[in-house]
Image: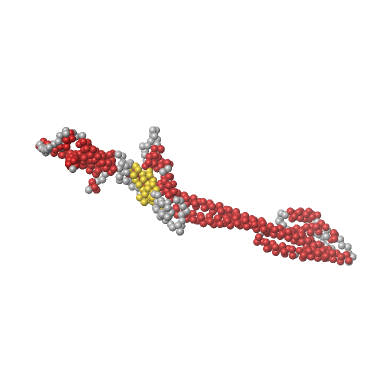
Amino acid sequence: MRELRFYAALFARRVHWLLLAVLLGALVGLAAGRMITPIYEAKALLVVEGDRIPDGLAASTVRTDTNAKLQVIRKRVLSRESLLDMARRMALFPDLRTESGARNADAVFEALQNSVEIEISEQSKSRSAPKDATFMTVSFRAGAPARAARVANELVTRILKEDSDIRTKAARDTLDFFSREVDRLEGELAKSSSAMLQFKQENGDALPEELPLLRDRLAAVQAGAESRLAHVNETETEIDRLVRLREAAGRVVDRDAIYPPSARELSRLEAQRDALKPLLPADDARLAALGAQIQELSQQVTLPLPKANSAFESRLRELTDTLFVAQAAGDAADLKIAQLREAIAKVPANASALEALRRDHDNLADQYDSAVKARAVAETGDTIESLAKGEKLTVIDQAVAPGEPVKPNRKTLALAGVGVGLLFGLVAIALRELLSTGIRRPEDLQRHLGISAFATLPYLSTPEDTRRRRRKVLVSGSMVGAAFVAVLVLFGAFYMPLDRLF
């Protein structure tokens, strides 16, 4: 207990040196914090806002993952080209130059990389967890507060522009894609319709919907075969009867004289041509051959024929022409039957081909309708993004000029100075006492000289000792007071006004 009281009294006599060391340490810390070049950091806060218009009414066509989009924006803003462009526009780091005096792009880029920081808040990856808002923090460090805020706001402006460009470009690309798809499908649909129309025109007599009519027409033509044959027979019989009656009256019937062979052949060919003409195309070889024969015979036959000498000759010519017409009608009927049978035989193949064309046309029509609907949705999405009504980044806190630097941490330096001063004072006091060889108590006699004290007398101070002690107290107090005043002055001038502290 005596030891504790001794050292407590000894510490009390030296406490002014400890206070002086603490105050000097604080002064050194405050001065160091002031002399080190300050670094100011300006921060801006952005948040990802959701769509302004409910998806149930009108949905945006931009469906990118929010975190992935923000990562892309950060990479673009922090790219070498973007940072160097910003440094050139804002005249950042003008002192970083090469030996030739040119701007050192590598050094400027590295300095900007070390000064810019863009942080994105992490989202919960659990599907069951509620989706948190996504924030982006943009900060820039510089030696001047105003410059730090100005560059941070420039970074925010570039981030907002990148966000707008990404979304509007995605919406515009979507709209352009579906517009081109609609135009392409519209052209394909027109080609398909044209192909179907051309197929129907080329096979108009052998289409599936014409099959019942074809069968009815074939039945009708076949049903008229007997009447046509009977008509031919009746005409031939009438000619024979007329000739026999003429011969029975004692008249000689010279058919070649009444109706010359070339004229009869011309009449037969004309009747055949007139009967086949409705059934064959104009460029058919048979019609061409008949036309050539008719033209050749027309040059040989004198038309019109001489007038008949009697009613018999006129009637014979008429019946001969009627026979030619009836025979030509029979030949035309046979051709018509062959054409109808050929058309009926083509119907199954035409039906299959037409069904394939219709199926392709329907598929194209469905694709076209889907593309038109998608284009309408894309137009709505493009309008939403053009009006900035979709998901977008919004500034919550604009960067402002900071009042305090982030480096150096002056409070930490001041506290470190106090701690170092305290440690130094304690060490100095301890060393002074440990290195002292003087005898100040009975225990020192026993430890140093091996003599045991049998009595102690108090120290009688002389007037000179009193004056010397007072001078020491005055000097040490003055030094401690001066150091304390200096600490207050530095603290109030460089850190915080004293009226806010008291």
Whether residue 77 is visible, yes or no, is yes
Quadrant in which the N terminus is drawn:
top left
At 39% across and 53% down in the image, what residue appears?
Answer: 132
Q: Name the image colouring.
A: secondary structure
Is residue 36 positioned above or below 251 on the image? above
**Residue 25 horizontal side relative to residue 210, left or right:** left
Q: Nearer the viewer, residue 303 or 110?
A: 110
Residue 228 is situated, as x and y percent measured from the top left of the image, at 77, 64
Residue 48 is situated, as x and y percent measured from the top left of the image, at 40, 52
Residue 495 is situated, as x and y percent measured from the top left of the image, at 26, 44
Q: Nearer the viewer, residue 219 or 468?
A: 468
Q: Nearer the viewer, residue 56 or 23?
A: 23
Number of residue marks: 0
User: Where on the picture, by quarter, is residue 288?
Assistant: bottom right
**Residue 103 horizontal side relative to residue 475, left or right:** right
**Residue 138 horizontal side relative to residue 204, left or right:** left
Q: Nearer the viewer, residue 470 or 225?
A: 470
User: Where on the picture, by quarter, is residue 100?
Assistant: top left
Task: Report the residue that reaches farthest toward the right.
Answer: 250
At 38% across and 36% down in the image, what residue appears?
Answer: 97
